[in-house]
Image: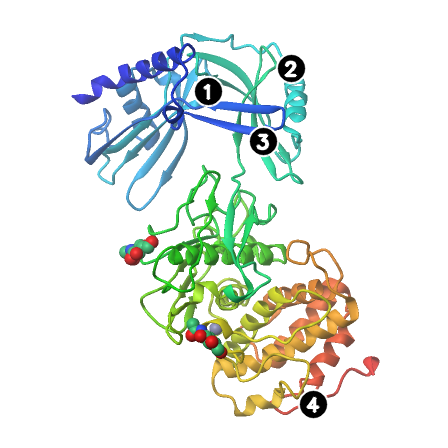
Amino acid sequence: MQFSKFSSTVLLAVLYATSVKATPMPFAAKHATHRVREISPDLRLETYHPPSDYQTFGEGIDHPLRKRQDASIETAAVAFVESQLGVKAEEVDVKSTAETDGADHAYVQQKLNGIPVANAVANVAFNKNNQVVSFGSSFVKPIKAASPTASVKVEDAISTAEKKLNGKFLREEFPAPTLEYLAKQDGTAALTHVFQVRNEDASTWYEAFVDAHTGELVSITDFTAHASYRVIPITSQSPNDGFKVLKDPYDKAASPRGWHSTGGSPTSETAGNNAISFKGKKRNTTSQSGRDLQFIYEQDPSLEPTAGKNIDAARVNAFYIVNTIHDISYKYGFTEKTFNFQNNNFGHRGRGNDRVLISIQDAEGMNNARFATPPDGQNGVMQMFLFDITSPGRDGALANDIIAHENTHGITNRLTGGGTARCLQTIEAGGLGEGWSDAFAAWTEQKSTTVNDFTTGTYVLNNTDGVRMYPYSTDPKTNPLRYSSLAEQAEVHDIGEVWANLLHNVYAALVKKHGFSKTAHTDPSGREGNVVYLHLFIDALSLQPCNPTIPQARDAWIQADVNRYHGAHKCTLWKAFASRGLGLKAKKFRDDSTIPSECR
Ligand SMILES: *[C@@H]1O[C@H](CO)[C@@H](O)[C@H](O)[C@H]1NC(C)=O
Ligand SMILES: *[C@@H]1O[C@H](CO)[C@@H](O)[C@H](O)[C@H]1NC(C)=O
Ligand SMILES: [Ca+2]
Ligand SMILES: [Zn+2]
């Protein structure tokens, strides 16, 4: 069969690599096996990754143990690798297995002298009929392997790498250092100490390979993907405010592997651990426009949203906003443990495989947007539609307020009631949901101690009034809505306007009293009004009952303040709520302006 060629291909790959030393490869010939990384002005490292052979087998081929019903996926994979590559069972280890809908996967590591070879791996996939459907391998046959006993101490290797990579090996946090072979381009295998080195301030996180005989840093794995996006910054609302190119806008604590990795190697498209942004089919994402995850696409407002690069600009902007909201809400408590949207939960509790699916220019609707929140463990689905009120039309995916509004539905539905997504179903609770969504969008756009009135939907409608009855405002002449206005409101968005305006007044009161933090998006530790507000916003969602009423939602805010701040903001909160009719004795949509006696 054709696979008998396999082992010779591997050998050839090594020979080819050996010959490289004498004649440098042409630039493009290195794409599949090399990468140059500029670590610092005086460290430029070219890493080597042996080429992978890869074959796919359609309906599948047999592996040696197929007849044996009791063979596990691990033993079947080892037997298959032995038969294909002419290696012995003791020269391989199964590192991990994974089961997906279509196939079962085994990931295999080559060993030399009983020690793993870091960059020599194989992967075997079996269909549900227990036949092999694909096989990839970067196994090597080194011309010389270094002695398996290290002569350089691991402590010395660590200090070398910490110095060269300007970071730290975090003993408490990182896996213990390992000893691994590393296949080199010259056909030899070096013995290396392997461990992680990170510098949080500089946004770097590497895996270092230090030669255990020479003490030299010979290779690295870069866990961080640098990315740039041409987007409307989250503090702005729409293209009217201008696009900017943002570099690495992700938050390291909220998205430890950035926005383009679910844990393994980074993707080069608008897809990652928190979200995937696409048009039509999920596969239809935007790919990077250049090296180093560049997503730079210029929107042309004179063209329809579906023309030119406008689709890419929309996919990129929606991807950026949803990821930013993931990171902001994560810092304030919407994490894996509280049922957020992520594919990989990195070992934290809660269910994964539920990143947000962002369908832009979705064909199912016009002049609107939607967010569907199933329970924890199933993807949140955001559908952004086109608007045809202007000519050319406009794209909801370029209206940050609309994306933020939709995304917040996911946050509130997951946090209320513990991830079941069943607890904002009544009309009043649904109205609260609409209110939080506008209020969160408004929070992202506030820029200073001056609290601006907030309108939403102005870009897609091309008017200054937006889609709501009134702008959110502390001025009752601009926005007269009070708790009692609910008696006349029967529709969730109208109910939401009352709640969002109450929250707008709470926000303004907190900022007036405690000031504004310009770093609130990334630093939740301050005591400024906008930080306190978002903490109470998020905390209250987990505290409130299933299908809350508006007075119950208010009570949860007051309780959240006791829990987090020992009630430090109690009177500020009560006064703000009471100023719009939601005082102590407000009920059944009858206003009340009573505040607790200690606040008078
Ligand atoms: C995929 O995206 C392109 C634009 O990038 C669009 O023209 C095309 O219609 C999309 N395909 C599907 C199946 O939606
Ligand atoms: C938006 O409205 C302004 C005036 O209010 C008008 O000049 C402009 O042409 C409109 N833009 C579109 C795309 O319809
Ligand atoms: Ca989840
Ligand atoms: Zn909504």
Looking at marks 1 and 2 on the same chain, the residue that comes earlier in the sequence is marked by: 1
* Badge 4 element: loop
The residue under label 4 is 592
Q: Which image quarter is the C terminus in?
A: bottom right
Looking at the picture, which amino acid does disc 2 mark? Lys
Q: Observer-nearest residue: 56 or 302?
A: 302
Q: CA distance from mark 3 to mark 1?
A: 16 Å
The residue under label 2 is 153
Using a 10 Å C-alpha cutoff, classify the residue at mark 3 as few (fewer than 14 neighbours), some (14 to 19) or many (20 or more): few
Q: Observer-nearest residue: 260 or 140?
A: 260
Q: Is mark 4 within 8 Å of ligand 4?
A: no
Q: CA distance from mark 4 to mark 3?
A: 58 Å
Q: CA distance from mark 1 to mark 2?
A: 19 Å
Tell me: 162 left or right of 433: right
Tell me: 228 left or right of 108: right
Q: CA distance from mark 4 to mark 1?
A: 72 Å
Name the residue at 50% across, 27% down.
36
Q: CA distance from mark 3 to mark 2?
A: 17 Å
Looking at the picture, which amino acid does disc 3 mark? Pro
* Badge 2 element: loop
Q: CA distance from mark 2 to mark 4?
A: 73 Å
Q: Observer-nearest residue: 370 or 126?
A: 370
Label for residue 57? none
Looking at the picture, which amino acid does disc 4 mark? Asp
Give the image quarter of residue 194.
Answer: top right
Give the image quarter of residue 445.
Answer: bottom right
Q: Is residue 461 visible?
A: no
Name the residue at 38% across, 39% down.
98
Q: Position of residue 122 (x, y in %)?
A: 36, 26
Looking at marks 2 and 4 on the same chain, the residue that comes earlier in the sequence is marked by: 2
Q: Is 70 drawn above or below residue 365 in the view shown?
A: above
